[in-house]
Image (cartoon, rainbow, N blue to C red):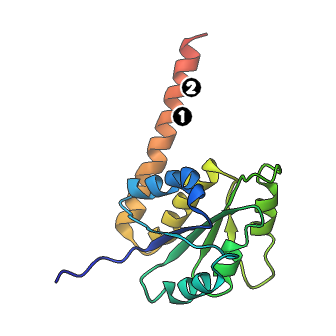
C-alpha cells in the first residue's frame, strides 16, 4: 500500500458556505504545488472536533493552519489555543451587516502568547493567507522558496505590463 503524502497546510473553515471565498486560498496554494487538507470545523457547533483537530495537527504532518470564519470568528483563536503551529486567520464577511469588521476584530484581538496572524477580510485575505503559509514553509524548503521568488517576479511583471498599457493609452 502506497503511503499518502500528508499536507503541510490545513485550510479550516467554520461553515461550508465559506468555501466560496476560501476556494481562492486553496487555488493559490495549488499554484505552489500544495494540496491542502480542507476541513469544515466550527469553534461553536463542534468545539470538541476543533480541539481534537488542533491538538493532532502537527503529528498529522500539518505545519501551518489557515482558519476562516465570519461573525464571532473564534475559529482561528480556538485552534491557536490548542497548538503551537502557526495559525493564519481569515476574517469573512457574514450576514451580520458589519462587512466582516466583527470577524476581523474577533480574529486579530488575541491575548498575549496566543498569536493569530490575521490577513485582510474576504477574498484578498484568503489569497494572502495562502501566500503567507507558503512564505512560512519556504523558510525550510528551497524549492518552495524558488517558486515564491518566481511568483513575486511574475506579480511585478504583471504590474509593469499594466502600467505600460496605461502609459500607451495617454
Q: Secondary structure at mark 1?
A: helix
Quick one: quadrant of the N terminus?
bottom left
Q: Residue at x 70, y 53 (%)?
A: 121
Is 92 situated above or below 155?
A: below
- Report x, y in % for residue 4: 27, 78
Direction from residue 3 to residue 118 in the image, left or right: right
Residue 148 is at least partly visible in this image: yes
- Report x, y in % for residue 52: 56, 88
Q: Secondary structure at mark 2?
A: helix
Disc on res. 159 = 1
Instruction: Place residue 17 in its image quadrant.
Output: bottom right
Direction from residue 16 to residue 122 in the image, left or right: right
Is 138 situated above or below 123?
A: below
How far is disc 1 from disc 2 in space, using C-alphas? 6 Å
- Report x, y in % for residue 46: 63, 79
Instruction: Place residue 2 in its image quadrant.
Output: bottom left
In this view of the protein, which residue sits in the foreground, 117 or 161?
Answer: 117
Disc on res. 109 = none
* Residue sitting at the far front: 45
Contact, CB < 8 Å: mark 1 with mark 2? yes
Question: Which residue in the protein does label 2 denote?
Answer: 163
Is 3 situated above or below 134?
A: below
Amino acid at each position: 500500500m502506497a503511503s499518502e503524502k500528508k499536507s503541510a497546510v490545513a485550510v479550516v473553515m467554520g461553515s461550508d458556505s465559506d468555501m466560496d471565498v476560501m476556494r481562492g486560498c486553496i487555488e493559490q496554494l495549488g499554484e505552489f504545488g500544495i494540496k491542502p487538507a480542507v476541513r469544515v470545523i466550527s469553534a461553536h457547533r463542534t468545539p470538541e472536533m476543533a480541539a481534537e483537530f488542533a491538538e493532532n495537527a502537527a503529528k498529522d504532518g500539518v505545519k501551518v493552519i489557515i482558519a476562516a470564519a465570519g461573525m464571532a470568528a473564534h475559529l482561528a483563536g480556538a485552534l491557536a489555543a490548542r497548538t503551537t503551529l502557526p495559525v493564519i486567520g481569515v476574517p469573512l464577511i457574514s450576514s451580520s451587516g458589519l462587512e466582516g469588521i466583527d470577524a476581523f476584530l474577533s480574529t486579530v484581538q488575541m491575548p498575549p502568547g496566543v498569536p493569530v496572524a490575521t490577513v485582510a477580510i474576504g477574498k484578498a485575505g484568503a489569497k494572502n493567507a495562502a501566500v503567507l503559509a507558503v512564505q512560512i514553509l519556504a523558510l525550510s524548503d528551497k524549492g518552495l522558496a524558488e517558486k515564491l521568488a518566481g511568483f513575486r517576479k511574475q506579480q511585478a511583471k504583471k504590474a509593469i505590463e499594466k502600467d505600460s498599457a496605461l502609459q500607451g493609452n495617454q
